[in-house]
Image (spheres, rainbow, N blue to C red):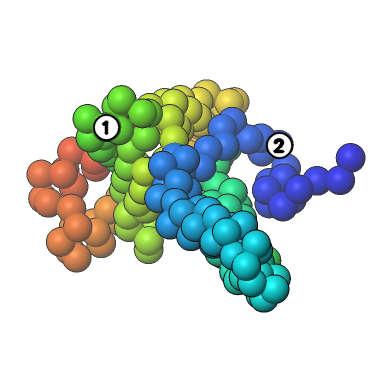
């Protein structure tokens, strides 16, 4: 069975733990106007067909919101948020793909925000602070954010327990992570207290 685009991005021994998308509210808000326009045009066509031979022209007009709605559905479907045992990946684009990934070992903090409606309908924002050039990744209104956050934190926790080789590699990368955190501190992204706390946590792993 041929691999899809997401599977082709995986490295050796890397596996997908979770795939989610933005909540269906996001899709609905994008296409609700197009649905209403399509229904209105269709009703107009049915009414006009009894009196106007040019009703076929109205049918062609109805295709415009339908095409736009199809595009919005494809954009929503192809925007994926993925947790693997090594990375967090964001993929977007129907034909031209845009991929942003963050190594789990560089993830410092994860912040989840849910409004009352978000808790009611199970969607929210996930903000990931990383010790990389990207700094912060923000995933807006994704579905089942609690499960996404849990899968990511569990995968990060397991990174240090996949064998002595993996653990040794993680320890060797700690000085570089501290240096990256210090750079974030200098840029004002991290406070001095936050930097010292993260530094202490990293040094405790050595």
* Mark 2, residue position: 13
Q: Is residue 166 above or below residue 150?
A: below
- Cβ–Cβ under 8 Å for marks 2 and 1: no
**Residue 118 seen in render:** yes
Quadrant of the snapshot with the C terminus: top left
Badge 1 element = helix
Of the pair 184 and 44, the residue shown nearer to us: 44
Q: Quadrant of the N terminus?
A: top right
Report which quarter residue 202 is drawn in: top left
Q: Is label 2 or label 1 in front?
A: 1
At x 43%, y 30%, the residue is 144
In three-dimensional space, the C-alpha distance between marks 2 and 1, rounded to whole angstroms, equals 39 Å
Q: Which residue is mark 1?
A: 117
* Image position of 78 with respect to 17: above or below: below
Position of residue 49 measured from the top left corner of the image (x, y, whole percent) = 65, 63
Q: Identify whether 88 is placed above or below 97.
A: above
Q: What SS does tag 2 mark?
A: loop
**Residue situated in front as seen by the camera: 109 or 94:** 94
Q: Is residue 36 left or right of residue 166?
A: left
- Looking at the image, residue 12 sits to the left or right of residue 129; the answer is right
Q: Residue 1 got which mark?
A: none
Judging depth in this view, the residue of 104 and 72 nearest the camera is 72
The residue depicted at 55 percent of the width and 47 percent of the height is: 80
x then y, percent, for residue 25: 41, 42
The answer to whether 168 appears left or right of 205 in the picture is: right
């Amino acid at each position: 069975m041929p691999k899809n685009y997401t599977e082709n991005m995986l490295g050796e021994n890397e596996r997908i733990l979770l795939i989610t998308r933005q909540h269906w509210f996001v899709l609905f808000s994008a296409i609700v106007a197009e649905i209403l326009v399509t229904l209105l045009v269709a009703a107009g066509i049915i009414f006009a067909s009894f009196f106007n031979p040019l009703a076929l022209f109205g049918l062609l007009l109805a295709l415009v919101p339908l095409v736009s709605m199809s595009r919005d559905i494809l954009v929503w479907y192809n925007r994926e948020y993925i947790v693997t045992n090594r990375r967090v990946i964001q993929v977007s684009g129907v034909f031209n793909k845009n991929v942003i990934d963050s190594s789990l070992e560089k993830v410092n903090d994860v912040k989840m925000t849910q409004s009352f409606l978000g808790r009611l309908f199970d969607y929210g924002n996930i903000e990931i602070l990383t010790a990389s050039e990207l700094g912060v990744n923000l995933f807006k209104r994704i579905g089942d954010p609690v499960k996404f956050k849990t899968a990511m934190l569990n995968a990060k926790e397991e990174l240090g327990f996949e064998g002595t080789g993996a653990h040794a590699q993680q320890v060797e990368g700690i000085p570089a992570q501290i240096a990256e955190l210090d750079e974030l501190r200098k840029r004002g992204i991290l406070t001095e207290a936050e930097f010292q706390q993260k530094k202490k946590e990293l040094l405790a792993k050595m």
